[in-house]
Each structure stands twice: as C-alpha cells, then as structure tokens.
Image: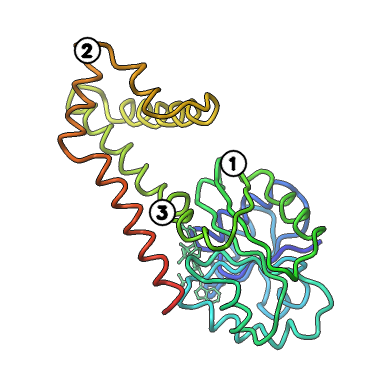
Amino acid sequence: MKIGFIGVGNMGGALARAVSKTGDGEVLLYDKSEERAEALAAEIGGVSSPLATLVREADFIFLGVKPNILPFVLRDISPLLLGRPSYTLVSMAAGVAIRQIEEALGFGAPVIRIMPNTPVAYGSGVILYTPSENVAPASVDAFRSMLREAGMLDAIDERLMDAASAISGCGPAFAFMFVEALADGGVAAGLPRDRAQTYAAAMLAGAAKTVLESGMHPAELKDAVCSPGGSTIEGVVTLENGGFRGTVSDAVLASFEKTKKLGKK
Ligand SMILES: NC(=O)c1ccc[n+]([C@@H]2O[C@H](COP(=O)([O-])OP(=O)(O)OC[C@H]3O[C@@H](n4cnc5c(N)ncnc54)[C@H](OP(=O)(O)O)[C@@H]3O)[C@@H](O)[C@H]2O)c1
C-alpha cells in the first residue's frame, strides 16, 4: 500500500509522522516546498514525490493544504484521478464539506473527511472522521489501521464536524495557553520555569485522563478537590470572577463560527 500526503505542514506533517509509525505502507510526500517534503521524508523514512506520481500511485491521498488552497489542488489532481480504479482521498480541511470536494473534482470520489489535531504526532491526538458513501468498508478499516498510532479515532456525522473541530482541532491552542498561564503563575510563586511548565502540562494530562476514565462529571471532580476554606476553592472563585468558563465556551463558539466560514471562501 502507498499512502500519499499533499501538503506536509503542521497537520499533514503530524499525520504523516503518525502513519509512518505503523509501517502500514510506503509514505509518499509532496509539498509546494520540496525542501519541506524532503526533510520530512528523511525524518520518517518516507519518499519525497512529484505530485503526479503521488496522485497516480497512492492508495490513500491525504490533502493537507489550507482550505483556501484546496480547490486549486483538487482541480489539478482531478484529471489524474479520473482513470484510477481505486483510491481514497482523505481531507483534513477545516470547514470543507465532502460535497464541496466532490464538486471541485467534478465527480463523486471516495472521500474520508477528517478533523485531526496536532497531538497525533505524539500518539495522543483526536481524529474525527466521516466517510463518503463511495468509500468501501475495507478502506475505512485500512484508514483506521494506518492511524492506530495517532490517538483516538471516532466516526462522526458530518453535520457535527465543524462543532467537534472547534474543540478537538482548535482546542489544543487553548490548552497550550492554559499551560503557559499556569506556568506563569508557578513562576510568579517562585518555581523555576521548566519545572512549572512540566508540572502544568502533566497535571492537565492527568486531569484529562481522570475525566475520560472516571466517567464522572467535571463539576463533581472539581468539587471533590475543593476542601471547605481551602486553597483550591480560592483559585476556583478567582477563575469564576475572571469569567473563565464563559470565556472558554465563547472561544469554542467563535472558532465554530469561523470554521463554518472557512469552507465558504
Ligand atoms: N493546524 C492544525 O491544528 C489543524 C487542525 C485540524 C485541521 N487542520 C487542517 O489541516 C490543513 C493544513 O493546515 P496546517 O495548519 O497544517 O497548514 P500549514 O502548516 O500551512 O501546511 C500546509 C502546507 O501545504 C503547503 N502548500 C501550500 N500550497 C500547496 C500546494 N498547492 N500543493 C502542495 N502543498 C502546498 C504549504 O506550503 P507553504 O507554507 O509554502 O505555503 C504548507 O507546507 C488545513 O486544511 C487545516 O484546516 C489543521
């Protein structure tokens, strides 16, 4: 099997790294920047490939360009795909529906639309996916297998993709900001920066695991660690006074609204 990537920036590169770990196929890489494709190929044991070769040979073609560039890439690869008996396109473009991809190609191609996030590079990503009706069940199985080192995979109705993307795709940036802010507080309290950052990130990973594995409501977990008159509740009240939860929810909604617009450009 050959697995191709068109556009190997932040997200395409992270997915190519994850796929290369499984050894499910030869990884072909194409990017507008040949140097970027070659550097990644050297890092992960893949092959930097001309676009036409990749499109003619790859069984899976991951589309890793920005949503505004995607229509141009689809227009370029459409004639190369027309004569091919079997292949699957995998689009990670935020806000771009399967229907729009098929319209840009000019035919009903097998497309898996995904919403990944950059932690896939470390095996802790979230990948939400929707296969089009043209994708064979065996191709979905192969797709899931090649990404088994990337993190969690979850099939989702395409209508929910933009909402999910506002949490799983945009959320890492919010979480990175939270880690940075926690570390700033730790430094202000006297901790060395590297320790403060490590403790903040490890704490966040542990708290996330607790939510996922306990099945408990986050509010219940919060209450359990707030002793009456204690230090934790002081911090919780300070966050509430600063509008923490409302601001975070608004950030997700703002990202959702922006994502919906991306595909319409
Ligand atoms: N970043 C995320 O966290 C994230 C999360 C979920 C989904 N996504 C989706 O992933 C896609 C890529 O986003 P990104 O953040 O990875 O962007 P990025 O870092 O800018 O990567 C895009 C890559 O594609 C290259 N490129 C541009 N035009 C090209 C063309 N015509 N043919 C081949 N390569 C081309 C770019 O080169 P130049 O830099 O030289 O232009 C760059 O290397 C987007 O559709 C985005 O919606 C991203």
Q: Read off the residue under disc 2.
A: 230
At numbered mark 3, what does the secondary structure look like: helix, strand or loop? loop
Q: Camera-side residue: 181 or 25?
A: 181
**Where does the image place residue 205, in percent across and percent down from the top left?**
45, 31
Q: Residue at x 48, y 65 (%)?
A: 94
Q: Earlier in the sequence, mark 1 or mark 3?
A: 1
The answer to whether mark 1 and mark 2 are in CB contact below 8 A is: no
**Going by the image, does 57 lie left or right of 121?**
right
Residue 251, given in percent of the width and then of the height, sits at 30, 52
Residues at discs 3 and 2 in contact (Cβ within 8 Å)? no
Would residue 81 be found to the left or right of residue 170 on screen?
A: right
- Whether the residue carrying mark 3 lies under 8 Å from ligand 1 is answered with yes
Quadrant in which the C terminus appears: bottom left
Q: Rounded to the nearest whole Å, what is the CA distance between mark 1 and mark 2?
A: 37 Å
Q: Earlier in the sequence, mark 1 or mark 2?
A: 1
Q: Earlier in the sequence, mark 3 or mark 2?
A: 3
- Tell me the mark number nearer the camera, choosing from 3 and 2: 2
Front-lying residue, 136 or 145: 136
Q: Which residue is mark 1?
A: 123
Q: How is the image coloured?
A: rainbow
Q: Disc number at residue 170?
A: 3
Q: In the picture shown, does residue 92 fall above or below 200?
A: below
Viewer-nearest of discs 1 and 3: 3
Give the amino acid type for the residue marked by disc 1 in the picture: Gly
- Mark linked to residue 112: none
